[in-house]
Image (cartoon, rainbow, N blue to C red):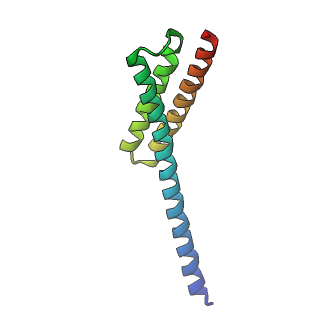
Amino acid sequence: MSEEERARAVEEYGQAVGRLRHSAFRNLRTSTANVAIFFGVVSGWMIVTGDAEPATLVPMSVSILGGVLGISTYAVRRQPLARHLLIGTVVLAVVGLAGTVIASQVSQ
């Protein structure tokens, strides 16, 4: 294998890895956003139908906010901002879900 062929193979390999990383991040972002959106919709539905207890209103509102951030990740295409939104989505979804579970356990 000549030096030129080797350099071309290394460049093609690097491009393939870059495409794989890009698609993996896109799939992770989509899945994470969908989970946060789902939690937000369920929390919103429980608040609207009156199934939420007063102690769980604040954590459910946080879940709704996480769902809104999850929706916003679909609109943003720039990588640094998309990552920051994704981190905020995950934090709000986890805090909202954990807060809802803890508040419902304490109120029983």
The residue sitting at 49% across, 21% down in the picture is 60
Position in image of residue 78 (x %, y %): 41, 48
User: Residue 103: which quarter of the image?
Assistant: top right
Left or right, residue 55 beside residue 69: right
Q: Is residue 27 above or below residue 46?
A: below
Q: Is residue 80 visible?
A: no
Tell me if residue 30 can be seen.
Answer: yes
Q: Is residue 96 above or below residue 8?
A: above
Residue appearing at x 44%, y 26% in the figure: 64
State the quadrant of the N terminus: bottom right
Q: Quadrant of residue 82?
A: top left
- Picture mark count: 0
Instruction: In this rendered view, identify the residue nearer to me: 54 or 67.
Output: 54
Q: Position of residue 91 (x, y in %)?
A: 55, 31
Residue at the (44%, 32%) spot, across then down: 67
Which quarter of the rendering shows the C terminus? top right
- Percent from the top left, x then y, of residue 85? 47, 37
Q: Going by the picture, which residue comes out furthest to the left?
A: 75
